[in-house]
Each structure stands twice: as C-alpha cells, then as structure tokens.
Image: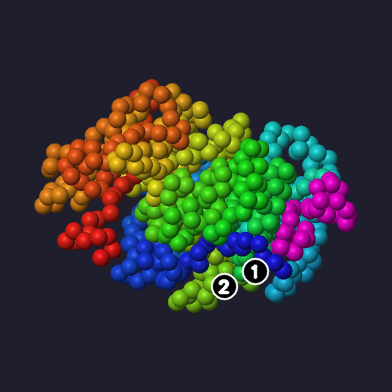
Amino acid sequence: MRWSSIAVLSLGLLWVVPGLAQAPESAALAPVPGTAGQTEEAGNDLADDTAIAESESETVPRPSYPDDPFYHSEGSWEQDFADQWALRDLRVYTDVAGSFEHDRGISRQVEELTPSTDQVDQPALPGPVLVDTPDGPILVLFEPPATEQAAEADTTKTEAPVIVAVIDTGVDYLHADFAADHLWRNPNEKRDGRDDDGNGFVDDLIGWNFVDDSNNPWDHSGHGTHIIGIITACTDNGLGISAINPDAVVMPLKVGNFIGQARSSAVAGAIYYAVDNGARIINLSLGGEVVTQAERLAAQYAADNDVLIVVSAGNKGFKASSFGYPSLPDVLVVGASNLSGERAGFSNFGTEVELLAPGVDVLSLRARDTDFIALSDPLDYPQGAAIVGDDEDYYRASGTSFAAAIVSGVASRLMTLRPELTTEQVRRMLVQNAIDVGVPGVDQRSGYGRVDLLRALGADPDVFIEARISKVDLQLIDEQVLLTIIGTADADAFASARTEVIPRSEALPNDGESSQDSGIGWQLLGSALTEPVSDGRLAEVNLETLIQMTGGARSWQVRVVVAHTNGEFRESRMALALPKPPPNGGAPGE
C-alpha cells in the first residue's frame, strides 16, 4: 500500500509518572518520564467550588450529580488530585447541573444479546442490543426502534443532537460506559448491502472505516475511543467517568491504523464525509509535518459549510505551524494546559494556537485490549501503567489530542444548550471568553487563554475584541531597515487601537536595571488607529529610531491594544530581538 503523506496521532506518546502534575518541560522532544527535579509540583489547583478539603471530607457532602464514581474520586493511580480533574477544573457540572436535558430515565448500560469473549479482534457491527427503558426493554440495531413511543418522542424533540465527527482510530462501541444512542446513525442507510443514500459508501450505518474501506470503524489502537469518551461517554449512570456533553452524538471516522498512521487521502475523505453527513464539529487530533492540498481543500470545504474543525497543536514543544494540521485554513487550534492552568511544557505554540484546555492525565475510556502509549515504546513506561480501574476499562493519557477533544466537547455542549448559535458564534464565544494565561492578552504560547464553559455560556455571541500580532516584516529601503508590525485590531464596536513597544529589561545596555528603573515605559509606535485592521499593517518604525527611543535596547516587547466602545480592551504581545553582536567586533559566526 502506498502511503501518501502519513499523519500520526498527536498524542505524542507522553507518559506522566504517577503523582506528578505534568510531563516535564524537558520532555518536549522525547517521551521521557519526569523526575522530581524536572517537573512542576501538582498541588491542588482545582476550582474552589469543586475541591473538597481533607478536613471537611466527613462533614461536607460530595455532590451527587453526575453519578459517576471517577468524577468524585481521586488518587486512583496514586496521584494527589481528582481523577477527572479536567472536568472539575472546567466547571462542566458546576452551577449548571440540572440544566442539561439528557435523558436520565434510560439506563446507559447496553447488554449484548450474543455472548462476548475476552479477546476481540474486530467484531461485526453489533446485532440487536437490549436497552432498559421505563416501559421495559427494547431492541436497538443502530436504528431508531419503529414503535409508537419512539415516534411520539421524535415529535417532541425541538432540536436534533449535535453531531461531532471524530476523525481518529475508530471507537470501541461495545464499551460498558458507552451506549449505542451516543453514536450517529445514518438516517438514509439500511443494513442491506446496498448504498441506499447514494453517497458512495455501502451500509455506512454509523460512520466509515477509511483504513479498511468498510462500514465497521472498530478501534484497534484505543486513541479514538479515548477521544470519544471525553466528549460523550455515558454520564450519570453510576458507572465510570463523566463526559463533557452526553447529549452529543459522535460520528466515528476511522483513518488511523493500529499504530496510528493515516493516509492524507483518508483524512481528506473523512472531512468531506463528516461535512456532507451533518457534522457540526470535527475533532482532528492527528499530527504530521506535511499537509496536502487535498486536506487543505477539505478543511476549506468544512469552513465554507459552517463546520468547526478542532485541531490539536501537537506535543513537541515546537511552533505549531511546523506541525501540519494547525496550518489548515479556519481551524481552531488547541494546546494543552497543566494542573496549574498554565501551558504544558510539551504543548506546541505559535500564532496559530487560540485556546488551551486540560491535557495532562486526562481520564477516559479504554478500548478493549489496547494500550496506545505502549505502542511508541516510551522510556520507563511499564506496560499497562496507564490503565485505570479494577475492570481495566479506563485509561489516562496526556497530550494536546485530549485538550482538543475537551474543546470539541465544550463547543458541542454550547451548541446543545444554545442551539440558535452559528458555528462562528460558538467559536467566537469560546476564544473571546477564555481565561487569560501567562503573558497578558493574546500571546503565542497560550493564545486567548484557557477555555471556560460558564464564561462562554453567558457571553453575547456578537461581541468581540480581536487583538493579534501575527508577524513582523523587515524591509531594507534606502539603506535603512524598516520594521512593519502585521496583525489584527478589530471589534464589533471598534473604538481605537495603538501599537506600543517597551525594551526587555535584559536588553538595556546598562547594569541590568529594569525598564521601569530606567524610566522607559511603553511607547507609541506611529499613531493610534481609528479604523479596524484585519491581518494588515498595525505600525511601522525605522530600526535605528526604535533603538534610539528605547535607550539602545536590542530586544523588545511589542503589543497592540484594542479598545471597544464599551470601555473594555484586549491586547496581544510579541517579543522581538536582534542577533547579538559578535564578540570583539568579529563577523557573525566567529
């Protein structure tokens, strides 16, 4: 088989030693477990309204919703933080419990009618499965049961569930903590060996397997099942984990084989399939340095049809633009945050990154007989060490793959709770209402900040402030170097914008006094803007003038500050530096 441009899963094969908060900064280039001297301390950084102090554990009742053991437990792999710290940190079930309209009257456990075996190679799509309802058990064959009750239920539904396409390694659809009603079902296809809907795929009842060209997207790797569990595992069923949006349905599109390799043609085909079959969100937690024109055209097709593609930034600690899929047009690129809420050291960075989400020790479903971290043979990883639970049905992993899945889940939940929103509005609400991380404002390491569901839910979808420095162009004109700051300064009600510069303290040619001590503060470059700018020129300055106005500095912080007519503002910063002069006046490189 010829593999044209191979993508690999962007999990990055990260392994976090039990008890440590995140993969070490030094692990950006290799999946090496951290040591006490290499990692940040975990601490207890959960939100105050969800953390429960040890001294109060006997007097303060734990919340009963959702009724999923791992959501309320901690220490299941000897760590000193909550097992599902990511959901608790995001406040997914804080203050909005009860507003979520998923059907709690139906048992989420599905029992196979046919005997199961311990070892499963690739099962056929399940035959009838038994679902317990208040009216008694019913049989489900990945198609709505043809009953009067079902017909009545359909007429009472006001909105169709949000469809999230997961382009990955497939799904273990027989997992005890996952149910058939969480799978997308093709309403125009029957199991009859024919292409009933004429879309080129025979019997594509729940999605497609682009690896084997079949209708069975069974997961041999485990990565896809882990992604899907984060988004829409069974929730409030007294079993295992909670999901971010148990009302969403997932469309599993298998493009990755057992070791996580995928052909670019398969990825492009899966994107087209997802768009044409009603997906509103596509989760793409894949990596690879080369992106083909076919994939770019597919991504543009999704954007043109109001479909949001959420992409993982990658786990090499590199610029995201060199990682492939973050360079696709109009995608939402997500990096990983650690338990302290900061960018995880392994997470890729760059102007493409817009959001962070928890990406360290994320607990989710384990596809049967899988251990996908072990596939990369990371150093010091004991086989099976990431498997969690007495029944070994759960798995913990770190990487931007899972941060992207969290954002896909949050976006789908926002669409579920506010179905009138367009995809563009949802994206805007997520990025505009993120919690600022690190350097003030929008920056290359954390984008707009860490995703926050509650802030997004309460936001006005039409209000925005865009501030972004994307690059600095240098031109030689009449033997003088001209710096042009390129970026965006915009708002729905734009007031003004200004571009400013300040010398970095270590760049001043003195005894190390800070810029504040030297009296050099933020200085205006050019004149203030009275009209918005979109990916254009924000300011220009002559290099010699820049050096003189900043006391001889050779490195700077540049920022653009955008003001809204309501008095709010947002800024974006970028660091600039000239090459250090060679010692003793020698030529560079001596």
Camera-side residue of 548 and 585: 585
Q: Which mark is residue 375?
A: 2
Looking at the image, tell me whether mark 1 or mark 2 is earlier in sequence order: 1
Q: Are discs 1 and 2 less than 8 Å apart at CB? A: yes
Residue at position x 88%, y 53% from top?
A: 194
Query: Looking at the picture, how far across and down is residue 550, in whole percent?
Result: 20, 40
Binning the other alpha carbons within 10 Å of mark 1 as few (below 14), some (14 to 19) or many (20 upward) gives: some
Q: Find the magenta span and give its range.
A: 189-218
Residue at position x 37%, y 52% from top?
A: 342
Camera-side residue of 228 and 393: 228
Query: Looking at the picture, how far across and down is residue 325, in whole percent?
Result: 55, 53
Q: Is 490 left or right of 235, judged from the image as shown?
A: left
Is the residue 78 above or below the residue 430 in the image? Answer: below
Residue 260 in the magenta stretch? The answer is: no
Is the residue 294 above or below the residue 455 in the image? Answer: below
Cα separation, mark 1 vs mark 2, equals 9 Å
Magenta stretch: dominant secondary structure: loop
Of the 4 image quadrants, the one containing the N terminus is bottom right
Amino acid at circle 2: Leu
Amino acid at circle 1: Phe
Provide the secondary structure element on which disc 2 rests. helix
Quadrant position of residue 215: bottom right
Residue 205 in the magenta stretch? The answer is: yes
Of the 4 image quadrants, the one containing the C terminus is bottom left
Query: Looking at the picture, how far across and down is residue 548, in whole percent?
Result: 19, 40
Binning the other alpha carbons within 10 Å of mark 2 as few (below 14), some (14 to 19) or many (20 upward) gives: some
Residue identified by numbered label 1:
258
Q: Inspect this view and state whether residue 32 appears.
A: yes
Q: Is 447 left or right of 264, judged from the image as shown?
A: left
Camera-side residue of 568 and 391: 568
